[in-house]
Each structure stands twice: as structure tokens, then as C-alpha cells.
Amino acid sequence: MATQSFDIGKGIFWFFIRFGERPAGALWLMLFQTLCVLALMGVGVLVMGPAYLNLFELIGADATGHLADAEAARLVLDVMMPFLTYGFLIVPVTLLLAVMFQAAWLRFLTKGEIKPVIPLRLGGDELRLIGVNLLYLAVAVMAYFGIVTVLGLFGFGAIMMAQDSGGSAAMGISAGLLIGTGVLGVLIGLVILGVRLASAPALTVLDGRLRFFESWEASKGVFWALLASYVVVYVLMGLVGGILGVIVQLILLAAFLPMIIEFVDLADHGQMADPDAVLASLQSSFTEPGTIVAMIAGFAVLYAIQVLLEGIWHSVGAYNAVRVRSGGEGEAGDAPVLGKDHPMGASPSEG
């Protein structure tokens, strides 16, 4: 069975095609991810809340000019310790959750599969995706040093041309064009590298094996279709994200409107806001139930939008992986699976 040709329409709307197949599961996965992030934020507020209160106290005490050195050192330490503690704890947990959600979404986008009840797992898919992401990091580091080298060479060449020209305008323009050519070449190289390797995570989940450079082969002959799909998806993401983001920001603006009106009223009367009054107003605003609810709801909607947009973005590479594997063939080196009608007999089934 031959591999399917690349359908740009499917590449752009693959997320919505999968969503239409299992809308309840996709919405639950999106909601579950949002709830997990809100829970992490709640832990952060509990840990970091005292630090921010100490920060307000430090700012207020410093504004009055009566802060002793010993007291300042104590307040700075009270502010810094929760930040350091939270950072050490939250970074590994956040990275692990990110990989688990990446695997969950890729299972949905490639196989239409969502695990029941709790959609997260920590198994082979997640471990292999950690390997893929580490390889992405290694490629990014090598690309960085390559970019620095290339731009350095072009910049050195431009400097030499400018010196040899003795201030000639024509040579100065040539030097500028040389640098521009180097920058353009780097950008083109990054786009090619990014598009050709974009299907690696989806192939890894779909094949159940670590796939990285196989993505280069999977994009062979369809680079321009892939690139066009990514460009259209990027434009759509910008439009949808911008419109929804403005709506959420207006809701949050309404939550802080009383405090804003108070400051505007002071400015209209030519009065300077007292630092203590500003801090008191901020603390009052952040402790109002309506403001807290609006902030939580606003963040939840913004994060859900981000999850949706990221799913749409990654669905292009997922579609390409599904397309490549549409014939049922594995990668080179995979053992062939023979059907029962094959002259050599069917492959033995796994227990």
C-alpha cells in the first residue's frame, strides 16, 4: 500500500479532524491540562504569597526612608528564599508534566487515542519523547554555534571589505549586502531544519520507538507542502489568539477597573499617590473575591487557548507522520509483519 500524498488542507486542519472524531476526549484532555497548571499555580501562590507580601513591605519601608540595613537584609532574604525553593521544586515537575502532556496530545493526534479518566501516563512514550527533546536541544546548541560561526565569518568579511574600500560608499553597501546574505542564509537554514525535523515526536509516538532523523526522510518530497501548512497555521494562530487574547484582557481590565479609576482620579486632581496608599490599593485589589475569580478564570481561558493553539501547531507534523505510515510499513530495520496469505506463512503473534 503506497504512502498517501500530502494534503495541505488536512495538514492545516488535522487538529480539527481529530477533534471531530473525539470531541469529548479532546476537551477533557484540554481541561485536565488546564486544571493541572492551575493546581501548580495554586501551590505557587501558597509558597510565593508570603514572599510577595514581604516584597510589598520592603518597597513600602524603603519608600519611607527609615529602613535599617539589618532589617533590609532580613526582608530581602524573606523574599528570595521562597523564590529559590519554589524554583528548585517546580522546574522538574513542570518539565515532566510538559512531556506527559506532549505524549498525550501526540497519541490523540496520531492514533486518535486518549487514555481514560486520567489522560496522563509515564511510560515508554514519555521516556522516548524526553530523548527526542534532548536531541532537539543538542541540534539547537550545534545550530547556535554554527550560526555564530557563519555570521562571524560574514561580519569579518564585511569589516575587511569596508577597510579595503577606504570609506567607499559602494563597498560599504557591498559589505552590508554580505552581512544581509549571511543572515538570510541562516534564517533559511533554520526554517529547513525545523520543518524537516518537525515530525520526529509524532513518529516516535506512532512507531513506539525513538525516531528523530527519520523525520528528515518523512519530509522528503513534501517540504514545500509542510512549509505552506505551517505558514497558514501560524497566521491562523495569530488571528485567533489575538482576538481571544484581547477579549480575556478586557475581562481582566474590568476586574481591576476600580483601582484604575482611583489612580486616574488622583491624577486628574494633580495629586501624587502615596506609596502606602498604592500598596494598600494593590493588596485590596488582589484580595477581592471578584478579582481573584476573574484572574483565575482569565488565566484558565488564556491557557486553554494556548493549549489549543499548540495542538493546532503540532498537528501538522502529526499529520505528516500519519501520512508517511499510512501504508503500514515500518522504518528500515523494523521486522516485517507477514499476513496469513503470505507464501512463507503469517508472522507469529506476540503473546
Image (spheres, rainbow, N blue to C red):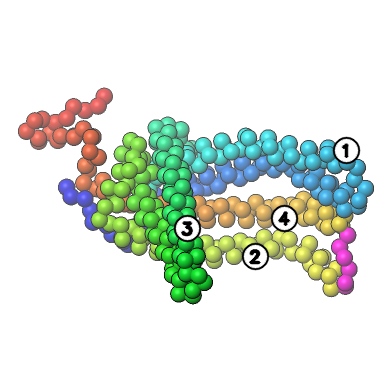
**Callout 3: helix, strand or loop?**
helix
| Residue that numbered label 1 is attached to | 70
**Callout 4: helix, strand or loop?**
helix
Pointer 1 with pointer 3, Cβ within 8 A: no
Q: In the image, is residue 109 above or below residue 6?
A: above
What is the x, y in percent for residue 30?
A: 49, 48
> Looking at numbered disc 3 in the image, what kind of residue is underneath it?
Phe
Image disc number at residue 229? none
Q: Which tag, 3 or 4, sits closer to the chain's start?
A: 3
Label 1 – label 4 distance at C-alpha: 36 Å
> Looking at numbered disc 4 in the image, what kind of residue is underneath it?
Thr
Crowd rating for badge 4 (residues with CA inside 10 Å; few <14, some 14–19, many 20+): some
Residue that sits furthest to the bottom in the current view? 169
| Residue that numbered label 4 is attached to | 291
**Callout 2: helix, strand or loop?**
helix
Q: Main secondary structure of the magenta part?
A: loop
Q: Which tag, 2 or 3, sits closer to the chain's start?
A: 3
> Looking at numbered disc 2 in the image, what kind of residue is underneath it?
Leu
Pointer 2 with pointer 3, Cβ within 8 A: no
Residue that sits furthest to the left in the current view? 343
| Residue that numbered label 2 is attached to | 250
